[in-house]
Image: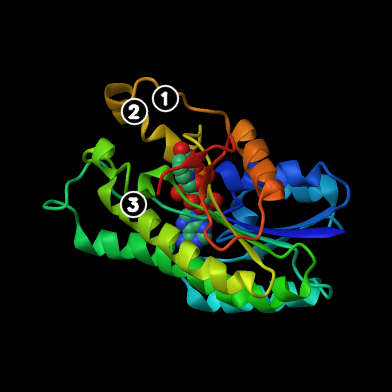
Amino acid sequence: MTSYLVTGASRGIGLAMVEKLLQNPSNFVIAAARHPNRSEDLQSLRTKYGDERLTTLILDYADPASTTAAAERASMLLPNGLDYLVSNAGVALQSGETFDTIDLEVFEEELRINTIAPVRVVRAFLPLVRKGKGRKVVFITSRLGSLELAPNFGALSVTYSTTKAALNFIARRWAPVLKQEGIATVLIHPGWVETDMGDELTDWMKDHLPERRKISVDQSATDCLKVIQDSKCENAIKLYSHDGTTVPL
Ligand code: NDP
């Protein structure tokens, strides 16, 4: 069995990745979410696939203790280690604001969840990734975190963009270190996707980037999993878009 742990698996892209992964009978999936029991979709998947294929874990990016507890529980479930760790959970808590009007406390909260928590999560699960055969750590990030593209995005989600830029930087600084242990770091922009988060961007995208098209959550999950499979252990990692093209950093 190949093991995957996906965070933010209650809905959106995380849930769709879990669903896709379960279609391959040789995969065992841990779906981590802050309230796994409240996600009807996740519960239906548990009923459909059973405990041998899918387990859920409580993991709240805003609660460090839940990360430690989740890693301990996962280590009991995975005696042969974890093959793929996918840090997908994320939030966009304020949009359409400029830096002179943003709420700084909300900015701090976004940084804690989108930037600091993924570091904590990877650190907590690294011992298990080291024991696994797949040896990949994946960050779901955003092209909004590109420094080069930043001038194109006006006042769109400036704080969210900042948190993802920092996440991209962390991944690029960490990748050469993890590569020394044969662990690949993968940075993926999942596309503009039909999820709760993606739908909030619709008006801005129509007005400012009308040529861009929203993709289905199913398409995004399929594409992201292909990018993960195709990725290699590299020093200077790139930011891959879901379709396999690269996004300037
Ligand atoms: P959604 O808003 O649909 O889902 C977000 C997921 O993150 C949910 O499962 C949510 O759980 C979880 N989450 C939120 N806060 C926490 C927390 N404190 N701890 C643990 N989990 C949490 O977003 P998407 O599926 O669209 O986004 C997934 C990833 O893709 C994010 O990292 C996002 O930044 C990125 N992305 C999305 C794009 C898009 O167009 N949709 C574009 C570019 C990047 P809960 O149900 O409990 O709230």
Q: Earlier in the sequence, mark 2 or mark 3?
A: 3
- Rendered image: mark on residue 212: 1
Q: Is residue 138 visible to us here?
A: yes
Please state which amino acid type lies under the numbered disc 2. Met
Residue at 47 percent across and 51 percent down: it is: 141
Left or right of 176? Residue 57 is: right
For label 3, the SS is helix
Element under disc 1: loop
Crowding at mark 1 (Cα within 10 Å: few <14, some 14-19, many 20+): few
The disc labelled 1 sits on which kind of residue? Arg
Quarter of the image where the N terminus is located: bottom right
Q: Is residue 59 left or right of residue 196?
A: right
Q: Measure the alpha-carbon separation of dots 3 and 1.
A: 20 Å
Whether disc 3's CB lies below 8 Å from ligand 1 is answered yes
Q: Which residue type does callout 3 highlight?
A: Tyr
Badge 2 vs badge 1, beta-carbon distance below 8 Å: yes
Q: Quadrant of residue 30?
A: bottom right
Residue shown at 64%/44% (left/top)? 227
Question: In terms of sequence position, does the residue under pointer 3 or pointer 1 come before the other?
Answer: 3
Q: Is residue 51 above or below residue 202?
A: below
Q: Earlier in the sequence, mark 2 or mark 1?
A: 2
Kindly state the secondary structure of the residue where label 2 is placed.
helix
Badge 2 is on which residue? 205
Image marks 3 and 1: residues in contact by CB distance under 8 Å:
no
Picture colour scheme: rainbow
Q: Residues within 10 Å of mark 3 (few under 14, many from 20)?
A: many
